[in-house]
Image (cartoon, helix red, strand yellow):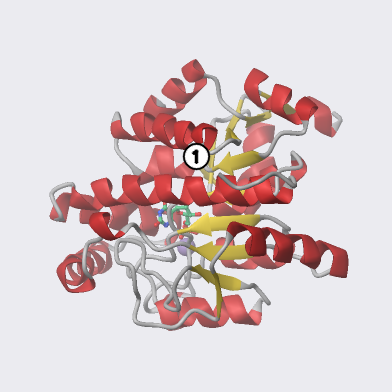
Amino acid sequence: MTLSNILTFSPEVAEARAAGRPIVALESTIITHGMPWPQNVQTAREVEAEIRTEGAVPATLALMAGRVHIGLTSDELEHLGQARDVMKVSRADLAACLAMGRTGATTVAGTMICAHLAGISVFATGGIGGVHRGAELSFDISADLAEFSLTPVTVVGAGAKAILDLPKTLEVLETYGVPVIAYGQDDFPAFWSRSSGLKAPLRMDSAAQIAASHALRAQLGVSGGQFVANPIPQDAEIPRGDIDPFIEQALAEAATKGISAKAVTPFLLQRIFELTQGRSLTCNIALVKNNARLAAGIARALAGLPVR
Ligand code: PSU
Ligand code: MN
């Protein structure tokens, strides 16, 4: 099987590719493992619409029946949003999921690999995986971090959640040579909150600069991608002091229940959703849209177009 047999482009994305229009990749784990139905499908559609409004074309990525889908039709998106037994596909699972013909939702790492295969340089998500608290004992470090050292895709996220050990997450990203760029502020954002209290290693204030450094890395032969940490809009933020007790409670429950490996992140997200009575989800939706808008600007700048 050649690569072109494995990649299936939606009509919208195929047309955009042919016309050389800017494209923004979107992950699907956030749909299957990150949000409940029906808000997951509703949000996915709204995020796609934000990207179109900003003058780029969205491509939601997922695996179905042995194919990597680059862009989902409306029916495919609805199907994925309600599907059960969906694999969570990171680097380790990609080929295996295709070989077994199973339905797979791509994580940040999985989406970076598939986006790169499809010639897409920019990807928007909510938050990335990272170093879990207690990683010195559990060794639980998301494969997302290593992916940034391998695959040349610029990822826009709202930082990383405080369910993780954020100082250790930044240290590992530094070890892997990953540029962590806070957008428009000095601090590294903490997903639901605009600041983690930690300074980001780099700061940029325009999509054009981010696009320029993406392009320069390729010219210089520096492998890997960039992580753009875009703070949640002010009016959607949950202050750190408000969310911290819920994070502590969710972490304690995960420990008591012996939740491990791939189940950790989805468990914590679901518990925090319940504990905040849905407020974490409202927040999550606002920040993903915000990230989609910035990613569209970066994709336009990379394509030599003015940012809207
Ligand atoms: N962090 C979030 N929301 C998410 C995820 C992480 O704030 O939805 C998802 C992403 O798909 C990410 C994955 O790539 O979880 C990381 O999982 P793990 O920690 O098992 O590597
Ligand atoms: Mn893990």
Measured as percent of width and height from the top left, residue 299 is found at 65, 47
Residue shown at the point (44%, 60%) measured from the top left? 261
193 horizontally vs 217: left or right: left
Which residue lies at the image location 53% right of the left edge and 56% below the top edge?
156
- Residue at screen point 25% across, 68% down: 251
According to the image, label 1 marks what residue? 28
- Residue 60 position, x and y percent, is 55, 35
**Does residue 260 show up?**
yes
* Residue 171 quadrant: bottom right
Left/right of residue 174 with respect to residue 250 in the rendered view: right
Relative to 84, say whether 106 is above or below: below
- Residue 147 appears in the figure: no
Using the rendered view, name the quadrant where residue 133 is placed.
Answer: bottom left
Quadrant housing the N terminus:
top right
The number of callouts visible is 1
Compared to 182, does 60 lie above or below?
above
How far across and down, in percent of the image, does residue 56 sit?
60, 36
Quadrant where the image shows the C terminus: top right
SS at mark 1 in the image: loop
Q: Amino acid at mark 1?
A: Ser
Mark 1 is surrounded, within 10 Å at the Cα level, by few (under 14), some (14 to 19) or many (20 or more) other residues, namely many
Q: Nearer the viewer, residue 39 or 67?
A: 39
Which one is in front, 219 or 255? Answer: 219
Q: Quadrant of ligand 1?
A: bottom left
Above or below residue 279? Residue 62 is: above
- On screen, 74 above or below 110? above
Judging depth in this view, the residue of 148 and 106 nearest the camera is 148
Cβ at disc 1 under 8 Å from ligand 1: no
Q: Seen in the image, is 275 located left or right of residue 127?
A: left
